[in-house]
Image (cartoon, rainbow, N blue to C red):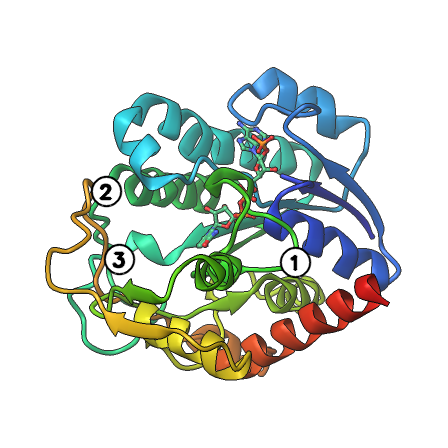
C-alpha cells in the first residue's frame, strides 16, 4: 500500500512510519513544513500527487493549556484539519486513520470507557479533538478513529517540549532527592510502538469505525512513576502530591482509562499490559545507553 503519515516527525508519527515501512508498505512521512492541515489547499497539494491508499493523521495541536488559550487555533488544526483530510481522502477513495484522545471523556466514570460511552470533553483540547472525530465520521466512510492515551516513546513529543513522562522522571531523579507526583489522575501509559503496530494490524481490516487503543490496565501518574523507579532500581523518595499541591489551570479528566472493546471483539487487539510495555521501553533504553558508552 501507499501510505502517507501526517505529523511524520512527531512522537507517534515516526513510529507509525517505521511500522508500515517494516511491513513492506511505501510510506511518505509529511512534516508540518510539508503540509498545513488547517488549509484545504495545502492538504490537497501535499497529498493528491502521492495517491496514497491510506492516510494516517497523527498531527494535532495538543498542548492542553495552549489549546485553552487559543481555541480558534486549536479548532483550526484539530477540527478543520481533520475535516480537510477527511474531504481529500474521500475524494481520492483513500482510507483515513485519525488519531484521537481519551480526553474526549469527562472522567466521571469509575470503570474503563468503551466506544459506546458518550463523550463529554472538559476542555478546549478535548472538544476540538471530538469535533475532528465528528468531521471524519461524517465525511469519509472509509475511516478508522483511534482514541489513545498517555503516549510515550523513543521519539520526543514535539508539542510537549521533547521529554516524555518516563524521561522526565528519570531526569528529575538525578536532580532531586525527593519527588512528589499526583496520585488522583488515572490513565493508561501506552507505548507509541504498540500503537503503531495496532494501526498496521487495523489497516488489514475493512471494519471501519471508532476504536479505543491503549495498553492494558491503568495507573495513577504516581503509580507510573513508582514503576519507572522500581524497574530502573532508581533510589529516590517518591511521595503522592498533597491535594492541590500542583494547581491546574485547565480541567482534565480524573479517570480516562479506555477499554479496547472494539479491537477485542474483532480479535485485533495487540496491546500488552502497561507494565510490560514500560519494561520493554526501559530495556531498549538501557541497551542503547550501553551501546553509546561502549
Ligand atoms: N502525547 C500524548 O500523550 C497523547 C495522548 C492521547 C492522544 N494523543 C494524540 O496522538 C497524536 C500524536 O501525538 P504525538 O505525541 O505524536 O505529538 P507530537 O510529537 O507533538 O506530534 C504532532 C505532529 O503534528 C505536527 N503538526 C502540528 N500541527 C500541525 C499542522 N497544523 N499541520 C501539520 N502538522 C502539524 C507536528 O509538527 P510540528 O511540531 O513541527 O508543529 C508534529 O510533527 C495527536 O493526535 C494527539 O492528539 C497524544
Query: Nearest the camera: 156 or 114?
Result: 156
Neighbourhood count class around disc 2 (C-alpha, 10 Å): few under 14, some 14–19, many 20 upward: many
Check disc 2 and report the residue beneath it.
Answer: 123
Give the number of the mark in front: 2 or 1.
1
Q: Please name the residue shown 23% across and 42% down the image.
A: 123
Residue at far top of view? 41
Q: Nearer the viewer, mark 3 or mark 1?
A: 1
Instruction: Classify residue 61 by image quadrant.
Output: top left
Task: Give the Cα distance between marks 3 and 1.
Answer: 27 Å
Total count of labels? 3
Q: Alpha carbon of mark 2 to alpha carbon of mark 1: how far?
A: 28 Å
Q: What residue is drawn where x is 34% and y is 77%?
A: 223
Residue 46, image x and y in percent? 72, 25
Q: Residues within 10 Å of mark 1 (few under 14, many from 20)?
A: some
Q: Circle 1 — which element?
A: loop
The circle on residue 154 is 1
Mark positioned earlier in the residue sequence (2 or 3): 3
Name the foreground residue: 242 vs 26.
242
Amino acid at each position: 500500500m501507499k501510505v502517507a503519515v501526517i505529523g511524520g516527525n512527531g512522537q507517534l508519527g515516526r513510529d507509525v512510519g517505521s511500522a508500515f515501512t517494516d511491513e513492506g508498505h511505501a510510506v511518505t512521512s509529511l512534516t508540518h513544513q510539508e503540509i498545513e492541515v488547517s488549509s484545504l489547499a495545502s492538504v490537497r497539494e501535499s497529498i493528491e500527487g502521492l495517491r496514497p491508499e491510506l492516510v494516517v493523521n497523527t498531527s494535532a495541536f495538543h498542548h492542553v493549556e495552549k489549546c485553552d488559550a487559543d481555541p480558534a487555533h486549536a479548532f483550526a488544526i484539530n477540527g478543520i484539519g481533520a475535516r480537510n483530510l477527511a474531504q481529500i481522502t474521500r475524494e481520492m477513495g483513500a482510507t483515513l486513520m485519525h488519531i484521537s484522545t481519551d480526553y474526549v471523556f469527562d472522567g466521571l466514570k469509575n470503570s474503563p470507557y468503551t466506544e459506546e460511552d458518550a463523550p463529554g470533553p472538559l476542555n478546549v483540547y478535548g472538544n476540538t479533538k471530538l469535533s475532528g472525530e465528528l468531521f471524519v465520521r461524517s465525511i469519509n466512510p472509509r475511516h478508522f478513529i483511534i482514541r489513545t492515551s498517555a503516549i510515550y516513546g523513543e521519539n520526543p513529543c514535539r508539542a510537549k517540549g521533547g521529554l516524555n513522562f518516563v524521561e522526565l522522571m528519570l531526569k528529575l531523579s538525578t536532580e532531586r532527592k525527593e519527588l512528589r507526583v499526583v496520585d488522583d489522575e488515572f490513565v493508561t501509559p501506552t507505548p507509541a510502538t504498540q500503537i503503531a503496530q495496532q494501526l498496521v494490524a487495523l489497516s488489514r481490516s475493512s471494519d471501519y469505525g471508532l476504536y479505543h487503543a491503549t495498553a492494558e490496565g491503568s495507573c495513577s501518574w504516581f503509580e507510573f512513576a513508582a514503576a519507572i523507579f522500581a524497574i530502573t532500581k532508581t533510589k529516590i523518595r517518591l511521595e503522592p502530591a498533597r491535594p492541590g499541591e500542583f494547581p491546574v489551570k485547565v480541567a482534565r479528566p480524573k479517570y480516562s482509562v479506555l477499554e479496547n472493546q472494539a479491537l477485542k471483539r474483532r480479535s485485533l487487539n495487540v496491546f500488552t499490559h502497561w507494565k510490560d510495555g514500560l519494561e520493554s521501553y526501559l530495556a531498549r533504553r538501557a541497551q542503547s545507553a550501553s551501546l553509546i558508552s561502549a
